[in-house]
Image (tube, helix red, strand yellow):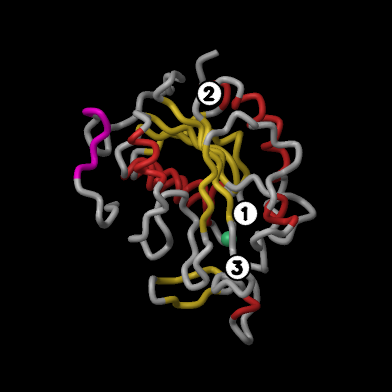
């Protein structure tokens, strides 16, 4: 996968697409990326991921082991083009063709400034240094924390991590088969050694999307691990 506009896709000598080690070294060159742990993606929210809230205590514990933490936050204007309500006659979870490809339509969710867009109150990652908001352009969705769904507009996260000397990304959050998967594949494409901690994620699993996402992540050199695989 290419990121348009990027030139040299290496990070401090790491070859692009380098296969990750089986377990990540957690040091000052590792970042924990916490994807979309927001009220609307948890039970009771507008786009609840089944058992999405269960990731919170797992992520809280993991976060204590990382000195670098970045959060992503889905952050849509009202009337966003990814909402079924913006497409007359369409229902949530149907699809439409957008200029950038097929788009799943979602219930209205994570509207800027709303309670649903807030991070879970019990998410305890106050040491996080950056929040990357995404999906804020009305006409383009962004599952990935790195590149919008048009596959060419960067969020700035690649540059932020590179400038800080980050080499490896450990990714957790919601939902495994959409925002986590896209974020992980883009992290790998940008040259970061990339891991997804499967028991620190929960999935939507829409018509086989979870299995497909794991296969795509594997093809793109994303290493699937569990919390117990991480060094103590
Ligand atoms: Zn969204």
Tag shown at residue 77: 3
Disc number lying in front (2 or 1): 2
> Could you tell me which residue is drawn at 37 percent across and 31 percent down?
164
Disc number lying in front (2 or 3): 3
Classify mark 3: helix, strand or loop. loop
> Could you tell me which residue is drawn at 34 percent across and 38 percent down?
221
> Could you tell me which residue is drawn at 47 percent across and 48 percent down?
181
Q: Nearer the viewer, residue 7 or 219?
A: 7
Most extreme residue toward the right, as rendered? 44
Residue 114 position within the rendered picture, expressed as x and y whole percent measured from the top left: 72, 59
Vertical relation: 120 (above or below) 135 = above
Most extreme residue toward the top, as rendered? 232
Residue 104 position within the rendered picture, expressed as x and y whole percent measured from the top left: 54, 68
Q: CA distance from mark 2 to mark 3?
A: 32 Å
Q: Is residue 86 magenta?
A: no
- What residue range appears in magenta? 8-13
Tag shown at residue 66: 2
Q: CA distance from mark 2 to mark 1?
A: 27 Å
Asked if the beta carbon under badge 1 is closer than 8 A to the nearest atom of ligand 1, the reply is no
Most extreme residue toward the bottom, as rendered? 89
Q: Which residue is mark 1?
A: 204
Contact check, label 3 and label 1, Cβ < 8 Å? no
Residue 222 location, quadrant: top left
How many marks overall? 3
The quarter of the picture showing ligand 1: bottom right
């Amino acid at each position: 996968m290419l990121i348009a506009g990027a030139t040299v896709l290496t990070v401090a000598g790491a070859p692009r697409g380098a296969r990750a080690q089986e377990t990540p070294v957690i040091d000052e060159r590792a970042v924990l990326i916490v994807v979309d742990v927001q009220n609307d993606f948890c039970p009771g929210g507008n786009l609840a991921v089944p058992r999405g809230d269960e990731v919170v205590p797992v992520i809280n514990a993991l976060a204590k082991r990382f000195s670098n933490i970045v959060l992503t936050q889905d952050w849509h204007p009202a009337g966003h083009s990814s909402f079924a309500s913006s497409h007359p006659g369409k229902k949530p979870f149907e699809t439409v063709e957008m200029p950038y490809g097929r788009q799943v339509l979602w219930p209205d969710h994570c509207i800027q400034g709303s309670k649903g867009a807030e991070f879970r109150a019990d998410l305890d990652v106050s040491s996080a240094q950056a929040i990357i908001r995404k999906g804020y352009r009305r006409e383009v969705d962004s599952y990935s924390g790195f590149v919008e769904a048009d596959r060419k507009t960067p969020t700035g996260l690649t540059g932020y991590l590179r400038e800080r000397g980050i080499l490896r990304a450990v990714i957790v959050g919601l939902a495994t088969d959409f925002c986590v998967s896209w974020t992980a594949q883009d992290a790998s494409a940008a040259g970061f050694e990339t891991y997804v901690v499967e028991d620190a994620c929960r999935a939507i699993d829409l018509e086989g999307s979870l299995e497909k996402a794991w296969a795509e992540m594997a093809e793109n050199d994303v290493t699937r691990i569990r919390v117990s695989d991480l060094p103590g």
